[in-house]
Image: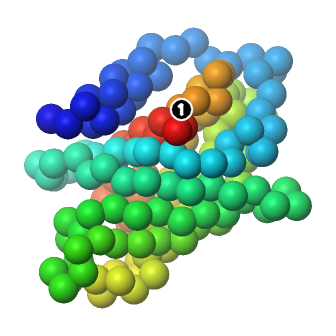
């Protein structure tokens, strides 16, 4: 397994044992802007974890970005898949979360959406959570670069 994948799996395991964030754990959307490296896994299928990169931009309280990943399920004519997303910072009961819908841009014949919901680490350096497409689900982890 590649070192980044090992680090991301370690981050996911770390989050599994964290105590819930308190009301004093305030996150500003601007703290999340930048480059992230991630990994997503499938729950119901035996498929290798997929590494991806994410660029998150914040402008006038709008959160959006773009992802890039190796093509593991699209038309083989495209070596990589790209997606755009809009996101939202959710603060309320429980830990702060980043919620976003990633929509593939058509590269490799893929244009479906994927819903992500992740808990933000107290140091703002990581996010871990779940993704969903219809009934298919999985886990993801992100590390800020």
Answer with the quarter of the image where residue 121 lies: top right
Residue plotted at (26% across, 63% down): 70
Residue plotted at (46% across, 22% down): 15
Q: Is residue 101 visible?
A: yes
Residue plotted at (78% across, 45% down): 30
- Quadrant of the drawing holding the N terminus: top left
Decide if residue 117 is on the left or right side of residue 61.
left
Instruction: Report crowding for label 1: few under 14, some 14 to 19, many 20 or more residues within 10 A (C-alpha).
Output: many
Determine the secondary structure under disc 1. Answer: strand
Q: Name the residue tied to disc 1.
A: 126
Residue plotted at (44% across, 45% down): 37
Residue 91 in percent (x, y) is at 77, 38
10 above or below 27? above
Decide if residue 50 is on the left or right side of residue 60.
left
- Of 122 and 101, the residue lying toward us: 122
- Of 13 and 142, the residue lying toward us: 142
- Of 141 and 4, the residue lying toward us: 4
Residue 69 in percent (x, y) is at 34, 62
75 above or below 98? below
Residue 119 in percent (x, y) is at 57, 34
Q: Is residue 113 visible?
A: no
Q: Residue furthest left?
A: 46
């Amino acid at each position: 397994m590649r070192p980044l994948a090992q680090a991301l799996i370690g981050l996911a395991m770390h989050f599994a044992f964290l105590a819930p964030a308190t009301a004093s754990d305030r996150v500003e959307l601007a703290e999340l802007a930048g480059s992230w490296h991630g990994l997503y896994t499938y729950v119901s299928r035996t498929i290798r974890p997929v590494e991806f990169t994410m660029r998150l931009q914040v402008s006038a309280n709008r959160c959006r970005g773009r992802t890039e990943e190796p093509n593991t399920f699209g038309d083989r004519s495209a070596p990589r898949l790209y997606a755009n997303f809009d996101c939202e910072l959710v603060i309320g009961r429980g830990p702060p979360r980043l919620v976003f819908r990633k929509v593939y841009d058509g590269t490799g014949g893929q244009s479906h959406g994927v819903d992500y919901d992740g808990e933000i680490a107290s140091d703002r350096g990581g996010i871990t959570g779940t993704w969903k497409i219809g009934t298919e689900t999985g886990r993801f982890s992100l590390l800020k670069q």
